[in-house]
Image (spheres, rainbow, N blue to C red):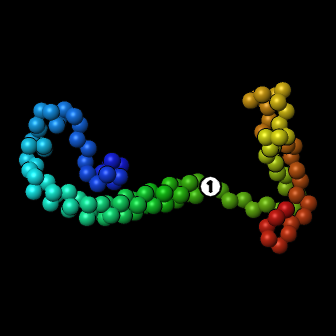
Amino acid sequence: MPYSLVYGTDAVIPVEVGEYSLRCSNESGPNNDESRLQDLDEVEERRDMAHVRMVAQKQQVERYYNKKAKVRPLKVGDYVLKAKTQAAKNPNEGKLGTNWDEPYKITATTNKGAF
């Protein structure tokens, strides 16, 4: 949980504190101190595990996206669209104006993949 990753313990709502739930009534002074120290020791491990899960999820999303993406190499003679910059947009067109300049034809390539 994000709260436990930040603060090192689970959240306790005010109702649990006022009504003495089983969760709050079992905690005593020395036992609570030992439990807190153990939780603080485990915080780094929890953060590492959360980081591992986050990286794994990003890799899964990347694999899913790349599976659907079709790579098409560009070559001389192809037409491409160039995105308009905010300065080049006509303010009178509003949000329904075009986001692209006219199509450009590729006439030459360089050795580093620039056209």
Vertical comparison of 47 with 21: above or below = below
What is the total number of numbered labels drawn onto the structure image? 1
Where is mark 1, residue-wise? 69
On screen, residue 28 above or below 19: below
Residue 19 shown left or right of residue 47 in the figure: left
Give x and y (percent) for residue 84. Answer: 81, 43
Q: Position of residue 21 (x, y in %)?
A: 11, 38
**Is 37 situated above or below 22?**
below
Q: Please give the name of the residue rendered at 41% of the width and 61% of the height, measured from the top-left corner.
A: 51
> At 45% from the left edge and 61% from the top edge, which residue is drawn?
55
For the C terminus, give its image quadrant.
bottom right
Q: Amino acid at mark 1?
A: Ala
The secondary element bearing badge 1 is classed as loop
In the image, 35 versus 98, the foreground residue is: 35
Residue lying furthest right: 107
> Is 4 placed left or right of 15 in the picture?
right
**Residue 100 is at least partly visible in this image:** no
Q: Quadrant of residue 108?
A: bottom right
Give the percent coordinates (x, y) of residue 106: 88, 58
Q: Nearer the viewer, residue 98 or 21?
A: 21
Farthest bottom residue in view: 111
Q: Quadrant of residue 70?
A: bottom right
Left or right of 30? Residue 77 is right
User: Measured from the top left, where is residue 44 in percent x and y?
Assistant: 33, 64
Residue in the image at 82% along x and 30% along y? 91
Characterize the local packing of mark 1: few (<14), some (14-19) or many (20 or more) Cα atoms within 10 angstroms.
few
Give the residue displayed 91% in from the left and 60% down from the top: 107
